[in-house]
Image (cartoon, rainbow, N blue to C red):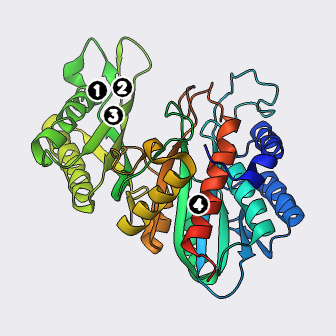
Amino acid sequence: MPVLNRIAAFAEEMKGWRRHLHANPELAFDCHTTAAFIVARLREMGVDEIHEGIAQTGVVAIINGQGAGPTIGLRADMDALAIQEITGADYASTIAGRMHACGHDGHVTMALGAAKYLAETRNFAGRVAILFQPAEEEGGGGNVMVQEGVMDRFDIARIFGIHNAPNLALGHFQTTPGPLMASVDTAWVTVTGKGGHGATPHECIDPVVAVVAMVQAMQTIIPRNVYAMDEAVISVTQIHAGTASNIIPEVATFCATIRAFRPEVRELLKRRVHEIVAGHAAAFNVEAGVDYDWGYPATVNHPEEADFAAAVAAEVSGEAAVNARANREMGSEDFSYMLEARPGAYLFMGIGPGAGLHHSAYDFNDEAAPIGASFFARLVERAQPLA
């Protein structure tokens, strides 16, 4: 696997960065210590500009190449998750209830590795802007960075990102032109009836039976309202009601995650959820409200950039290790906002066997970091070659 020689030479240093980040996880926008660590490393590398405080704790590093040219953007998310780690590693999280269970520590490390190489070699024209982004897991930090004008401020022409993929062979890449990951919306439904004794339901208005009917009806939306070739998901993930075996509660609630690729399908799902809740509320004589959280849009790769990124990945890992027409994923990503703002592409990179993302036993494979850094570095060199 042709990892760039210079990057291979400081692979142990990268491992140290990653394990430090893993031991010190931070959540959402509260990535102050993480940002300070990143800034310290960037200063050691001698990048040309460091811009802090973007989306509260985000960092943008600018590295100038040789001669005029556009600015290419590379993005790495840096926040952790509210999960208790069980890996038992000697570099495990030092903060109870928090861990890097999605590999953002690895993403930061790969971007830092690319920055170190690019700052040393400068074998490209124009500039590279490396975006270290908070709050991917919660809060939409990618959207905040875009809203704060990061694309225009740094004149970014194209933007690229990668996400690690457990149980995909080490160094293998997957992507596809067009939609790669789904939009994600959340419906919180509150149903209010009239509580009372379970022995006298005729004196009550039972919200539980209304919730059961609503949940069942929602499962008909996709097979009966969505065209069969348009992938979509509605999963009811929470139901809460009652405090005792013999009491009909006053209130019952449930929550659903709702995912699609096409904007018109996304709109349809929202409309049908509201219609079903309203209709069943009338039928069961309850009051019902829907708090509908319009979340991340679908992550849609630009075809030219997706094919270009796949070609670079093939240069790093070999053509047999790259699937440039992979299946779409129903997960979601706030990199989607950056792809709405600029042409670009997002890829998955395998880190080998292990616990899945968001699992308390997950751990990023340090052997993957030099591969990802090499991909980022070659992406810049190939996108903006010297004349």
Of the numbered discs 1 and 4, the one sitting upstream in the chain is 4
Q: CA distance from mark 3 to mark 4?
A: 26 Å
Which residue was labeled with disc 2?
249
Task: Name the secondary structure under disc 4.
Answer: helix
Whether tag 1 and tag 2 are in contact, CB under 8 A, the answer is: yes
**Residue indicated by mark 3:** 236
Q: Amino acid at mark 1?
A: Val
Percent coordinates x, y for residue 377 in the rendering: 65, 61
CA gap between label 3 and label 2 equals 20 Å
Closer to us: 178 or 243: 178
Does residue 252 show up?
no
Left or right of 233? Residue 80 is: right
Expressed as whole percent of the image width and height from the top left, the position of residue 352 reads: 56, 31
Residue 220 placement, left or right of 11: left
Q: Within 10 Å of the Cα at label 4, are there few (<14), some (14-19), or many (20+) other Cα atoms?
A: many
The answer to which of marks 3 and 4 sits earlier in the sequence is 4
Residue labelled with disc 1: 208
Q: Residue at x 29, y 34 (%)?
A: 193
Q: Are marks 4 and 2 in contact (CB under 8 Å)?
A: no
Q: Nearer the viewer, residue 212 or 225?
A: 225
Q: Is residue 228 above or below residue 360?
A: below
Q: Earlier in the sequence, mark 4 or mark 2?
A: 4
Depth check, mark 3 against mark 4: the one in front is: 4
* Amino acid type, callout 4: Gly
Residue type beneath disc 3: Val
Tag 1 or tag 3, which sits nearer the N-term?
1
Residues packed near mark 1 inside 10 Å, few (<14), some (14 to 19) or many (20 plus): many
User: For the residue marked with disc 2, what is the amino acid?
Assistant: Pro
Circle 2 crowding by C-alpha within 10 Å: few under 14, some 14–19, many from 20: many
Q: Nearer the viewer, mark 1 or mark 2?
A: 1
